[in-house]
Amino acid sequence: MSTIESESHRLTEEILGFIEAGVDAEIPDFNDYCMRMFVMHYENNKIFREFCDAKKVRPGDINRWEDVPMVYNDVFKTHLVASFPLEKSVMSCLTGGTTSLTQRGRIFRDEDGKRLVFAANRTMTGSYLFPDFEEGKRCRILILAPSPELAPSMGMAIGMEQTRQAFGTTDSRFLLGKSGIHINDLLKALRESEAGGVPVALIGATSAYVYFFQACRRKKMKFCLPPGSRICDGGGYRGRFGPVSREDYYGMVQEILGIPESHCVNVLGEAETATNLFDDSLRRYAKGLPPRKRTRPVPPWSRVKAMSIDDLSPLPDGEVGLLAHWDLANVPTVLAVITDNLGYTTDDGRGCEMVGRAKIEGGKVSPLPDEEAASPMGDSAIFRMLEKYVHFTIDLKMQMAKDPKLEPSVREEIEARPGSVASCPQVVDEILVAQADAEAAELRDKSLGAFKEQTERPLDWYAEEEKKQTLKDHPAGLKSEKKTKKVK
């Protein structure tokens, strides 16, 4: 094992200890771990090193975690952002996004990376979805999301399977198939819980629940699930089945399932960063704390800041900007990722909330007018977002961004463009309507095929793609490559 690989493994073992200590623990030397990880990533991640060199930020130049260069999540669509040898990859995920019309982000993790992401989300799920469970306690989990068999590289599918394994009883199961919701099985499970008085947990895609609740209303069908039942939604709602606010959603959960708002939990997951963030409603209820406006506590191994869309400077609590994450569980990729999620921080930065997503005009981040090539790769897409983003339009009412006191909306996804590969929540939408919509069925099949293809492709295919991208970003290199081939 090389020195760099040894340091990566040491970091992994130490960070796993912090994660297993729980969300109420502290990491007094968080900054020191960030500096160690920055050095490791700089030395072992070619794309990240070139990115840092272009920004003129190298190990030794900084001593604060806030100054570690933030990589925009769109870079994962155009480059293989891995800090380990790709041949050691054991896990891959596809992620959606807004700035690339046809590409999907590709996130690879090695064995240590897989251990980190699973541990982080097991701890977060236990703390915020099952905070009243003693160690080892399980319940029946009903999942309205694609299974790993249906979409093997979908982060939502992988994460929910991990939740099923960690917290579910043997009769827990996925209830969303290629042809839609397994409605008879879902109704049977809900009636069994209702009749037997045994609480259940429902987890899945927001849009699948909206679709199901609306169908129940039309059929005048309701349930009275026993106390202790809970529901967790994620992935966001794109408005496919009509306008539904977050308050409307909570009202439907109470009306159709009999689950109170205190037992409704929302989760925000980004494949580019390892740790999912849950809202704190159920945890506060379980601890006997008074209800308050929901927020997403940030665990001790992570930090989140809202960054100004004008100059990427950090914003104070309550001001809406682009959410950036510094996550120690990101050992196999990069420490700091800035996303296109719009949100704000709370509790002196110890929590955050999302209000929507940024939409970039023309389907891309516009280059700065005064941008100059900083290196042979200076014209690459990876450097066209170094200091600020321009020409943003926001996919929610403008007053939402101007007035952070307004309640956050359900996550709004940008509509798919022609030729795009659907994001996780959009795939769910297409599955739900595919039986009656040929276009939706076509997009569903294409997207599910992409998720399967991600796991079936040999790793050297990705290496070749990376080489093509590098040659594209280095015109001189491309000429050299052609000349070499001609000589041969």
Image: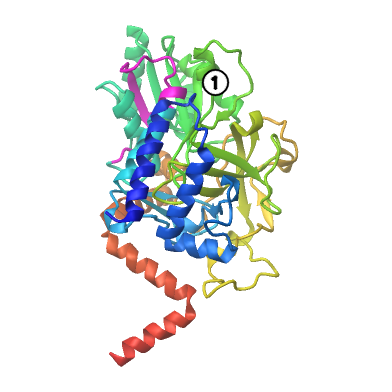
Q: Determine the main secondary structure of the stretch shown in magenta.
A: loop
Could you say where residue 102 lies in the image, as x and y percent from the top left? 46, 60
Please state which of residues 167 and 207 is positioned toward the viewer in this rendering: 167
The image quarter in which residue 366 lies:
bottom right
Residue at x 30% of width, y 64% of height: 461
Part of the protein shown in magenta: 125-148
Give the colouring mode of the picture: rainbow
Reading the image, the residue beneath label 1 is 281
Q: Secondary structure at mark 1?
A: helix
Which quadrant of the rendered structure holds the C terminus? bottom left
Q: Can residue 416 be found in the magenta stretch? A: no
Please state which of residues 124 and 191 is positioned toward the viewer in this rendering: 124
The image quarter in which residue 460 lies:
bottom left
Q: Is residue 236 left or right of residue 352?
A: left
Residue 145 visible in image: no
Residue at x 39% of width, y 43% of height: 11
Could you say where residue 414 lies in the image, as x and y percent from the top left? 56, 48
Residue 431 visible in image: yes
Q: Residue furthest bottom?
A: 487
Which quadrant of the rendered structure holds the N terminus? bottom left
Could you say where residue 360 lies in the image, as x and y percent from the top left? 62, 56
Q: In this picture, is 5 found above or below 269?
A: below
Residue at x 40% of width, y 58% of height: 44
Q: Name the amino acid type tagged 1.
A: Ser
Q: In this picture, is 278 found above or below 424?
A: above
- Number of marks in the rendered image: 1
Could you say where residue 5 lies in the image, as x and y percent from the top left? 33, 52
Q: In this picture, is 314 found above or below 477?
A: above
Q: Can residue 139 be found in the magenta stretch? A: yes
The image quarter in which residue 243 lies:
top right
